[in-house]
Amino acid sequence: MSELYASLPATKPYPGKEQVRSEVAKKLAQQNVDFADALLAGLARRFGEPLYSFDKDFDRLGTRRVEP
């Protein structure tokens, strides 16, 4: 898991950044999901926002998804 965590790209600082990075690394290690999906789901949960998407993969990531 440390390799996954280390490979996550650097971004500007924001509150809860380390929590999101950790969550994304866990999702990548435990579930068969795309990096982008895991990152978007983590950010949406961190900021309490839904994801507007037709992609039903977000449903299994514990993120509230709204179809546009």
Image (tube, rainbow, N blue to C red):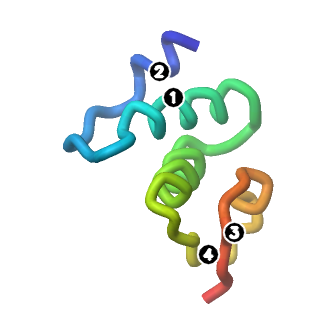
Q: Are marks 4 and 2 in contact (CB under 8 Å)?
A: no
Q: Earlier in the sequence, mark 2 or mark 1?
A: 2
Badge 3 element = loop
Q: Are marks 2 and 3 in contact (CB under 8 Å)?
A: no
Side of 35 where 66 appears, left or right: right
Q: CA distance from mark 1 to mark 3?
A: 23 Å
Badge 1 element = helix
Q: Earlier in the sequence, mark 2 or mark 3?
A: 2
Q: Which residue is mark 3?
A: 55
Please tell me in which quadrant of the rendered image residue 29 appears: top right
Q: CA distance from mark 2 to mark 3?
A: 25 Å
Q: Which residue is mark 2?
A: 5
Q: Are marks 1 and 3 in contact (CB under 8 Å)?
A: no
Say the numbered circle drawn on residue 53. Answer: 4
Q: Which percent across, then down, holds residue 42?
A: 53, 48
Q: Earlier in the sequence, mark 4 or mark 2?
A: 2
Asked whether 38 or 22 is in front, the reply is 22
Badge 4 element = loop
Q: Which residue is mark 1?
A: 22
Side of 15 where 27 appears, left or right: right
